[in-house]
Image: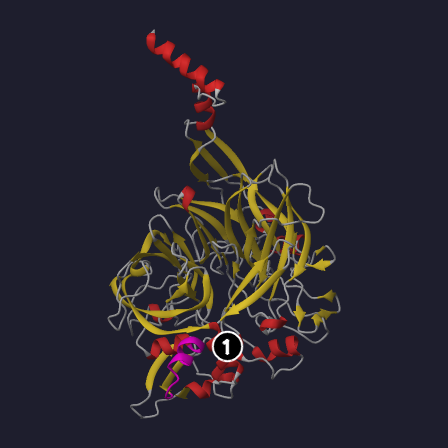
């Protein structure tokens, strides 16, 4: 009795002071709102013509709250807009030269390949015509796959035209979280010599869009040298230069293969800079550790390396040190397991390297090179993305080599350049681990001629990199980072389900395992990796959810046949709403007449449905995975 009286007295006093007491019902209400777990219930593979031709979800998200209550949300894909659409008078994904819009007989040309996307909350942002919450979205467009309708152009147009970036201003409906585009504006690239094959991206912790320029053009060939017979470079800088500068000879290869960073201000204006300090290679994208200084970048293609950039200052990519990994294999399962040694390549700044480029430095200024053995021991044989070459560094050109010919110099210094199709990288800040995608395990990873010997798997795999402080580089000096990789191992549940035996519809990968992982994003609040695919070994590509604790893998999104799932990004709590951003590119990029990869009896119908849904393959979607009513509830 006494205890009750005291409690009542305290409550009365608190009430008098304006301090509310906390009742059991208050606690219950709070527990009903605090999310403790989010799980996904996957969907079946597409089976109908409409499903095979569309982007859709039939999966579910199950939220568990602190009270123990659970709530199930059917998932639905929401398209914000298509490429070729006109928003606010501008064409989504529209392509530009240094002099204005690029046009053909259909009007302004647009990319059919949206990729890296950043949904952004910006303090003080004003969106014209918005009634709800203002948001911005930067989307980069990798290339145009289809040729221009100009009466003469034919074939695949990958790398032949400038890439593009655009910023959309969005209205977020407060209650449902639905997003509506109010404006779309091209991001001018003239000041940075044009955009080159913009692939994956990251929304930085300081709220900038960190993009990429994949498959750097070969400066040796651009300078008049002969391409190595086994080079993986298939880019066309002459065509790019013709379309962007109106002159096939103008483009300097050292302006491409860099790190674009986009800032959007409160007026919605976007500006871009290109960073030279992180090095130049076929970077799919890069992501940083907890310190906002240590970044790992994926190097796409065959015969590629693993690179680490340690910035001099937090949240600043304009100066730092580049390292390349030398791996020692410890197991051969999946994509292998390894210990890592970091070879220091050099330290520099954007300004210093850009000054070299602006002064006219060429490949021949940096290296002597031969595509055959010159019989001279001062040359060293290297095998990289650029093929088999014998290189000799010219005196005093170490810094130029490290930052402009990063992969070649890494190989010359003894780093491992045997990886294949190294794509996205994700980071787990709680466990201090990076996740690294190998889209296909092939070529130098399987030949046993160097540091790596594993079994071919065209379905790829995902590796987990453990980090530590106090790690020493190849010179014996301690790396100035608490997040340098020490070991790397394949995640067994994330090994591709590839087989040499095709199923009845022509799939070389099973439907219940990943195949050709490409995009990957980690969400700490729900301990989940989201994985997007890019493979021709399965006819439809998917987005998956993988819980790193339960090891459960669920298919949550399917994109149109022959399209690639791109632009994966997770916004965990935007005004109480969560978004899994996802795009696709080049729908129907294959044959439907029975001679293509797809062998289903409904092939012709699927092809016709794709043409009808996606504007004869010219359209591709930018959007997000939410609920049937709008966005998902916040993950945090």
Residue 452 image offset from top left, x and y in percent: 30, 68
Q: Tell me if mark 1 has few (under 14), some (14-19) or many (20+) residues whose alpha carbon lies within 10 angstroms of its own.
A: some
Q: Is residue 55 visible?
A: no
Q: Kindly identify which residue carries mark 1.
A: 354
Q: Quadrant of residue 157?
A: bottom right
SS of the residue at dot 1? helix
Q: How many marks?
A: 1
Asked if residue 275 lies in the magenta stretch, the reply is no
Decide which of 58, 595 is in the foreground and name it.
58
Q: Which residue is depicted at the point 42% across and 42% down?
A: 526
What is the span of residues highlighted in magenta in the rendered image?
394-405
Decide which of 41, 393 is in the foreground and name it.
393
Decide which of 197, 235 is in the foreground and name it.
197
Residue 171 image offset from top left, x and y in percent: 65, 45
Relative to 54, does residue 3 appear above or below in the rendering? above
Farthest bottom residue? Answer: 375
Q: Is residue 335 visible?
A: yes
Q: Quadrant of residue 413?
A: bottom left
Q: Quadrant of residue 476?
A: bottom left
Image quadrant holding the N terminus, namely top left
Decide which of 124, 285 is in the foreground and name it.
124
Structure colour scheme: secondary structure
Q: Which residue is depicted at the point 62% across and 82% down?
A: 248
- Indicate left or right for 273 with 335 as reference: right
Residue 623 image offset from top left, x and y in percent: 59, 50
Residue 579 image offset from top left, x and y in percent: 53, 45
- Indicate left or right for 429 with 219 as reference: left
Relative to 389, does residue 263 appear above or below in the rendering? above
Relative to 182, does residue 454 appear above or below in the rendering? below
Relative to 280, does residue 183 appear above or below in the rendering? above
- Indicate left or right for 356 with 237 as reference: left
């Amino acid at each position: 009795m006494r205890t009750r009286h005291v409690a009542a007295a305290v409550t009365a006093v608190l009430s008098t002071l304006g301090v509310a007491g906390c009742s059991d019902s208050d606690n219950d209400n709070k527990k009903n709102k605090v999310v403790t777990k989010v799980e996904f219930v996957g969907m079946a593979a597409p089976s109908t013509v409409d499903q095979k031709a569309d982007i859709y979800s039939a999966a579910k998200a199950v939220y568990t709250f602190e009270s123990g209550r659970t709530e199930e949300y059917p998932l639905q894909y929401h398209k914000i807009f298509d490429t070729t659409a006109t928003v606010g008078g501008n064409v989504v994904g529209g392509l530009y030269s240094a002099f204005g819009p690029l046009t053909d007989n259909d009007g302004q040309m647009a990319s059919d390949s949206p990729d890296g996307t950043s949904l952004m909350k910006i303090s003080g942002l004003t969106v014209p015509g918005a009634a709800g919450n203002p948001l911005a979205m930067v989307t980069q467009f990798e290339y145009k796959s289809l040729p221009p309708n100009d009466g003469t152009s034919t074939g695949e147009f990958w790398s032949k035209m400038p890439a593009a970036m655009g910023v959309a201003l969005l209205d977020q409906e407060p209650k449902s979280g639905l997003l509506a585009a109010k404006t779309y504006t091209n991001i001018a690239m003239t000041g940075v010599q044009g955009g080159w094959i913009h692939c994956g991206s990251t929304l930085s912790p300081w709220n900038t869009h960190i993009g990429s320029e994949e498959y750097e053009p070969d400066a040796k060939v651009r300078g008049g040298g002969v391409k190595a017979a086994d080079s993986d470079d298939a880019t066309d800088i002459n065509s790019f230069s013709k379309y962007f500068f109106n002159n096939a000879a103008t483009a300097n290869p050292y302006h491409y293969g860099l790190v674009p960073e986009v800032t959007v201000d409160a007026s919605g204006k976007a500006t871009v800079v290109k960073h030279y300090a992180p090095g130049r290679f076929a970077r799919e994208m890069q992501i940083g550790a907890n310190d906002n200084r240590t970044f790992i970048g994926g190097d796409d293609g065959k015969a590629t390396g693993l690179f680490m950039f340690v910035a001099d200052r937090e949240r600043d990519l304009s100066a730092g040190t580049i390292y390349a990994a030398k791996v020692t294999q410890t197991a051969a399962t999946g994509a292998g397991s390894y210990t890592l040694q970091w070879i220091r390549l050099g330290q520099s700044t954007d300004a210093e390297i850009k000054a070299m480029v602006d002064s006219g430095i060429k490949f021949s200024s940096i290296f002597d090179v031969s595509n055959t053995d010159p019989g001279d021991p001062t040359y060293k044989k290297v095998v990289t993305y650029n093929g088999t070459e014998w290189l000799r560094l010219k005196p005093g050109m170490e810094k130029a080599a490290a930052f402009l010919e990063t992969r070649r110099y890494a190989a010359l210094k003894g780093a491992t350049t045997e990886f294949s199709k190294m794509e996205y990288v994700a980071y787990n800040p709680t466990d201090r681990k990076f996740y690294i995608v190998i889209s296909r395990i092939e070529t130098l990873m399987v030949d046993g001629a160097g540091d790596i010997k594993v079994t071919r798997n065209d379905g790829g795999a995902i590796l987990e990199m453990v980090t530590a402080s106090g790690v020493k580089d190849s010179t014996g000096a301690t790396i100035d980072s608490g997040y340098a990789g020490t070991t790397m191992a394949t995640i067994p549940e994330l090994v591709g389900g590839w087989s040499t035996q095709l199923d009845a519809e022509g799939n070389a990968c099973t439907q219940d395992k990943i195949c050709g992982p490409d995009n990957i994003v980690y969400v700490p609040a729900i301990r989940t990796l989201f994985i997007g695919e890019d493979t021709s070994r399965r006819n439809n590509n998917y987005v998956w959810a993988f819980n790193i604790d339960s090891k459960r893998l669920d298919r949550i999104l399917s994109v149109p046949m022959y399209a690639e799932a791109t632009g994966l990004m997770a916004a965990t709590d935007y005004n109480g709403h969560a978004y899994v951003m996802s795009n696709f590119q080049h729908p129907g990029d294959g044959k439907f007449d029975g001679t293509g990869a797809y062998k289903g009896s409904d092939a012709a119908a699927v092809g016709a449905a794709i043409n009808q849904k996606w504007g004869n393959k010219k359209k591709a979607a930018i959007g997000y995975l939410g609920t049937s009513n709008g966005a998902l509830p916040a993950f945090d």
